[in-house]
Amino acid sequence: MRAAFLHSAEMEKYHYPPQCPFKTERAAMTRTLLVSMGSYMTDGTAEVPPAPATRTELEQFHAPAYLDALRRATDGKITPNDLFLGLGGDETPIFPGLYEYVSLAAGASIAGARMLLSSAATYAFNPSGGLHHAYPDKAGGFCYVNDIVLACKELAHAGKKVFCLDLDAHHGNGTQFAFYHDPRVLTISFHESGKTLYPWSGFENEIGVGAGTGYNVNIPFPPGADDAAYEYAFRQIIPPLLGWYAPDTIVLELGMDVLAGDPLTHLRLSNNAFADILLDLMEAGKPMLVTGGGGYNPEATARGWALAWRILCGLETDDSGQIGLGGTFLGSNEWGSGLREMRVYTRQDEREQIMQSVQTSVETIKKTVFALHRI
């Protein structure tokens, strides 16, 4: 199989509270959009309904006492101590079916990793995944169970070298924590700077410790960064790391909260940047697990993920040639010309400041991580 879309009707039963900006409905919206285009299932693809992650599987990263509390809170038995576990806050609300939903989301990423290991699929896509803020014993940032970590551990335990690239606007702090000492997983996070965005971490000097020194890379972007800044950093950092590390598999988080107009973040990308990056990564010829992540404009998020799926299926291979000022530049996220958005262009003076900041971050990584590994 070329590509597996990990989703089921069961996953559509669960919803965060209406006032919460995190919408589980985005995965179903992506599927519906693809079906309407006639490009959901094609030759060599399949929808794969995931099984929930088992307790044993969840305990590969999460503390038993934390999972007990998560299960209990889902059943309405909340205690004051649960707040210290991150359960019940504005960004981690308790809702009916919470435990069941996050178990399914985690199970989907684990299933995707196993499909790669067995060569059942070259690419696996879990739009409900990418819950990268969860720690072993604490929830945060709409994340309760860290499916990225569980999938990477599944691959690493099988003896695979894992290249984990997180493109969400928020720093993947839970994922970084999991592998900060571990050279079996090279973790790279491109994100809005922790100076301006939760979780207030992910700086260039966070490069790992002990055996993991040099196996954790952060590129923080200033507010306003656009496609050009993102793609510059990608070209400077990712190909050299791929060539040096020579991974067996790639795990890619596609958080769509980097898109211009997202209500919770301050970057100004179009989904073309993700499309270009995904096409470049596929040229490496490695099996790849792709997950969702952030994205608080549901329509724009579904459009971006639908574009990613079409690329994984080989249905979209290059830029559509759209140029000029997009709707996001004009203050609207409505765009009716296919899945690719118009690129957003930044004022010259602002772009120069942004690029100077990004270039400084890139040079810092070259002087530390690259120098350490003689890249």
Image (cartoon, grey):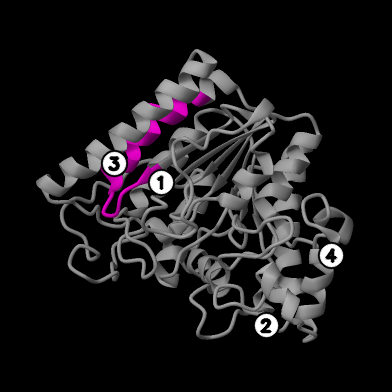
- The answer to whether mark 2 and mark 1 are in CB contact below 8 A is no
* Residue 95: mark: 2
- The answer to whether mark 1 and mark 3 are in CB contact below 8 A is no
Relative to residue 300, is residue 89 depicted above or below? below
Cα separation, mark 4 vs mark 1, equals 40 Å
Of label 1 and label 3, which has the lower sequence position? Answer: 3
* Residue 204: mark: none
Of label 4 and label 1, which has the lower sequence position? Answer: 4
Query: Which stretch appears magenta?
Result: 220-241
User: Residue at the location (26% across, 41% down)?
Assistant: 228
The amino acid on which the numbered mark 3 sits, given as a three-letter code, is Ala
Position of residue 152 in the picture relative to residue 217 (left or right) = right
Of label 2 and label 3, which has the lower sequence position? Answer: 2
Position of residue 90 in the picture relative to residue 257 (left or right) = right
User: Residue at the location (55% across, 78% down)?
Assistant: 90
The amino acid on which the numbered mark 1 sits, given as a three-letter code, is Ala
- The answer to whether mark 2 and mark 3 are in CB contact below 8 A is no
The amino acid on which the numbered mark 2 sits, given as a three-letter code, is Phe
Q: Depth-wise, is mark 4 or mark 3 nearer the camera?
A: 4
Of label 4 and label 2, which has the lower sequence position? Answer: 4
User: Quick one: 228 or 265, which is closer to the camera?
Assistant: 265
Relative to residue 183, is residue 127 depicted above or below? below
Residue 223 within the magenta-colored segment of the rendering: yes
Structural crowding at the residue carrying mark 1, measured as other residues with C-alpha within 10 Å and reported as few (<14), some (14–19) or many (≥20) = many
Residue with the mark numbered 4: 65
User: Residue at the location (82% across, 49% down)?
Assistant: 60
Residue with the mark numbered 1: 275
